[in-house]
Amino acid sequence: MECAIMGKFCPLILSSPRILMVEKRNVLGIRDRFKFCSSKFKIQALEAETHLSSQVGAERRGSSTDVGIGELVWPSPSDEIPFWEKDFPSWGVSPEVPADINKDSDRMHIIHVTAEMAPIAKVGGLGDVVTGLARACLSRGHTVEIMLPFYECIQKQQIKDLALITTYESYQDGNWVLTNAYRGEVSGIPVVFIEPSNHFFKGQFVYGGSYNELEAYLFFSRACLEWMQVTATQPDIIHVHEWQAGALPLLYWDMYHYLSLKKPRIVLTIHNMEHYGECSQEQLSKSGLDGSIYATIDKAIDDRTIGHNPERLSLLKGGIVYSNAVVTVSPTYLKETLCTGWLASTLLRNRDKYFGVLNGIDTAMWNPATDSFLPVKFNAQKPEGKKLCKYYVQRGLGLALEGTLDGNHLPDIACKVPLVVCITRLVPQKGLHLISHAIKRVEELGGQMVILGKASDVRVEREFEGLAKLHNQGPSTRILLMFSEELSHMLYAAADMVLVPSMYEPCGLSQMIGMRYGAVPVVRMTGGLADTVFDMDDQSNHDRANGFVFEGIDEGSLNWALDRAFAHYRDKADEWNGIIRKVMEVDNSWNNTAGKYVEIYNSVRVRL
Ligand code: ADP
């Protein structure tokens, strides 16, 4: 069924672009010609060949009709509302916490203190991990809550039963700031939202507001403890995440433990060692602690600044020293962090309480069989819907198609043009030079590539805007510079391969999510990528083989992996279908690893 709507264009890279449709005839095999412009730059005279690629090979008719496409409306780049911004039946997240999990006999009360939570305040993997781990522990029978800043950008309609529960005061820089605590439910998890009456956490985004971020998170850390104190809430475990909550263990042991909080023990998870919460003594003092007493090597001083004027503190280091247990997000990253980086000496000194626990993914939230963002659902046993997801995304983005639409029938899809996706924050860690090189290489190899990425640095954003301008006009590459949860789900479902060429990667969720959606990972062997992806051509590890791995940080190394992945895809089609099934069946769920966190919680908790 053809249903392209003439009118304004959907944004390829921008959130509110103006697009002009010049001409579009939606008959396959006929050249679509359209032009669009935006507030940031123009893409002129786009001529997208949407006729069948010459490489598609023999057509196969009569595709299965049991994939449940129902009244599927095929999208088009000319749709007024981009296909990933239409209304979806729900946020795609089952609020039901899986109940069919064995319950732990010894139940605990765990409170997470975090700067991110998926999907309401997600920037990267931190948000996914907090939500996934919380849901896994809830389903094991524990009492779990999340404490989150009440960012102005949070969409309140995504919170169930939101209600003001406490108005109290928390300390900041000589003043007591009136603060509201709200309670609500997100994805089945009880959440306490902390809303100070000052300017903290205001703005359009989770990070990058016009307030001092360090001071805001220092405030938040104390405000969480203050809330526990005024409400007499004494969990077994306060699980803090990243530098943003790194001061909480200091505040707990040197202040609130001397006041009323006796029972909690603190677990810190470090998701990324690159961000260490650089802080001056004066800034730390704004939390009510005496910043000067933490400026020692065995407390929170940033070792690299010793003897400098001024010396600096690190909230992350302080968090490591003062927490009862410290976890990082994969065994390989744990080893890497003990050998490299300035925090290695601190971690070595605290080795007996430092653990590597591989992240999981929430397989209820990331489930191609039920995902409400997908046009067609599929699973490992019935993967046919994946082809339709690919076709849907290709059509929606104006990429060259590999199939024909015949009236109301399903498209015949040839599958000779691999679609590679890369969904990432655009930061140096992620291997920016390799991501931009991949665009070229995938094009040379006759594949297609979609990058969904958000840059926080203006120079990186400009560089990728330049690439978008260069490539988005063609039939094989789309570079979409934005954050879209909905589109990310559709891209994982559409992808034949998911690329993660990181310079370092503490764990990486993208490769795990990709696998869950039948996209074969092509990754650099580092951190958690090395723990989850095993090379197809490594004969010694055939059972676990599930992707294509390279080691070097140069373009040649990436070429080697991409070339092999493309050769497998094209020359061994039957085997490839087997690989899809295999990667979809890999169990990277939290069920596998949440138990390790529970063991750690149990090892530090106290029974008063
Ligand atoms: P990191 O935590 O370093 O960002 P991970 O691979 O651990 O990397 O997690 C990234 C998470 O963020 C994944 O869920 C991925 O799908 C999502 N993500 C990254 N960039 C985007 C984007 N531009 N739009 C939507 N989701 C994104």
Image (cartoon, rainbow, N blue to C red):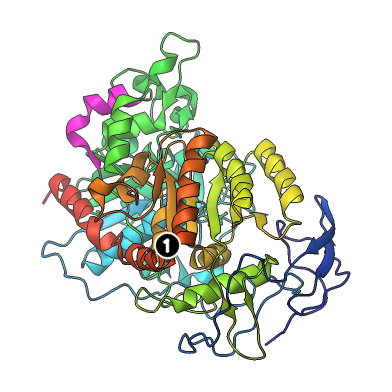
Q: Residue 599, image x and y in percent? A: 16, 51
Kindly identify the residue that appears in the image at 10 percent across and 65 percent down: 105
Circle 1: element type: loop
Q: Quadrant of residue 506?
A: top left
Up/down of 495 relative to 5, above or below: above
Up/down of 517 relative to 331, above or below: below
Q: Which residues are magenta?
A: 343-356
Q: Nearer the viewer, residue 315 or 433?
A: 433
Q: Is residue 91 visible?
A: no
Tell me the quadrant of the picture where the N terminus can be found: bottom right
Kindly identify the residue that appears in the image at 82 percent across and 60 percent down: 46
Could you classify mark 1 by the number of other residues whose Cα lies within 10 Å: few (under 14), some (14-19), or many (20 or more)? Answer: few
Q: Nearer the viewer, residue 22 or 488?
A: 22
Q: Main secondary structure of the magenta part?
A: helix
459 relative to 162 in the view: left or right: right
Q: Residue 385, image x and y in percent? A: 48, 78
Q: Quadrant of residue 129?
A: bottom left
Kindly identify the residue that appears in the image at 76 percent across and 56 percent down: 473
Farthest residue, direction right: 22
Q: Amino acid at mark 1?
A: Lys
Q: Residue 310, image x and y in percent? A: 50, 14
Q: Is residue 92 in the magenta section?
A: no
120 relative to 607 in the view: left or right: right
Up/down of 586 relative to 4, above or below: above
272 relative to 133 in the view: left or right: right
Q: Residue 267, image x and y in percent? A: 27, 44
Kindly identify the residue that appears in the image at 49 percent across and 28 percent down: 283
Farthest residue, direction top: 307
How many circles with numbers are drawn on the protein? Answer: 1
Q: Is residue 495 visible?
A: yes
Residue that label 1 marks? 572
Q: Nearer the viewer, residue 569 or 593?
A: 569
